[in-house]
Image (spheres, rainbow, N blue to C red):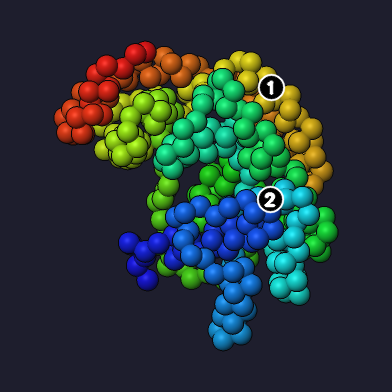
Amino acid sequence: MPTLGESLNIIEPHNALALKLKNEEDQHGVPSYYPHLPSGFQMFEMIENQISDLNPHSVIICSEVFALLGLTEQRKSIERLAKRFAKYDVTIYCNLRRPDEYISSWHRQRLKFGAKIGKLSDNALEEYLDTAHFQQDKLIEGWIRDYFFDSKLVVRNFDEVKAAGGAVKDFIKQSEIPFPEDIDFPENQNPSVPCAFAEIGRRGLHDLPRKEARQLVGWLASGKARHAIPHPTDNEIEMFGPENREILLNKFRPIAERLNEITKVRPFYHDLEDFGRCRSIPEAEAVEAIFSELVQEANLQKLPKPITDWLENWKH
């Protein structure tokens, strides 16, 4: 069924479930773009009713937000899920992305939500070191230590997932569920702002009025900018700088070792030492290289005047 124009409650109901469970556990809060959610109990009842009425072969509950439930203090949300579903034959499936790429991607995704964030090469890295973006061993252990310890665990390295054709194709293969053969596979549904444009979007959110700042970031993330303005690829641009690279690598080493033990894949991250190596193009140089063409394209595409004026007065 088409979901264009529907709220995120309809488009991403499993995110809504995970967010509601976490909020009921630790009062973390539910974003305003998931309005008027029913209780976790009501959502569980709906899923149980669907299972009862439809008698499906398999049920897939899927949300990145479930990763957060493994790091709560008492993991009450996971306990609630276990009370409902541990009686079934459960597989827990998780994709893990190397933390430097994951943190960079999520940091740039936050621009699309209008977040006024710092730079990863300054102190913004600190925001992520105690989160599921970095504490990857704890997010898995939180699921299997007390409740789903008898479940099948599939933990995939995102590099391998991409090599297998992407998250959807890899999930179909790993899940062992009999999917139809004529599935239409979606393209990337949620691209980040490219690294080469990210500092422009970040500064815009600090400097411009909210409406124009959001328009600027939306344009930078869109194909209208990404396809029109030649720019280095994300994996060529250094976002962290040498000091934060060293911090990231050293703090992740014990996490990587624990992942080896949990997944029984040694090493789970075969390129661990690369986490500490800087990419070839510093972020500031990447911005400088594309900036004049970006300003020209913004004028050609008739972005609002407050945006083009701000760009033309940009202080590098």
Q: Earlier in the sequence, mark 1 or mark 2?
A: 2
Q: Residues within 10 Å of mark 2 (few under 14, many from 20)?
A: some
Q: Nearer the viewer, residue 41 or 108?
A: 41
The image shows residue 121 at horizontal and vertical percentages of 55, 20
How much space separates mark 1 and mark 2, taking CA atoms? 25 Å
Q: Quadrant of the N terminus?
A: bottom left
Using the rendered view, name the quadrant where residue 146 is placed: bottom right
Is the residue 103 above or below the residue 139 in the image?
above
Q: Is residue 215 left or right of residue 73?
A: left
Using the rendered view, name the quadrant where residue 313 is placed: top left
Q: Residue at x 75, y 43 (%)?
A: 137
- Res 59 visible: no
Which residue, given by chain and number where applicable, does mark 2 sit on?
Answer: 155
Q: Does dot 1 land on a helix, a strand or a loop?
A: helix
Which residue, given by chain and number where applicable, does mark 1 sit on?
Answer: 247
- The mark closer to the camera, 1 or 2, is 1
Q: Is residue 219 left or right of residue 22?
A: left
The image shows residue 54 at horizontal and vertical percentages of 55, 84
Q: Does dot 2 land on a helix, a strand or a loop?
A: strand
Looking at the rendered structure, the kind of residue marked 2 is Val
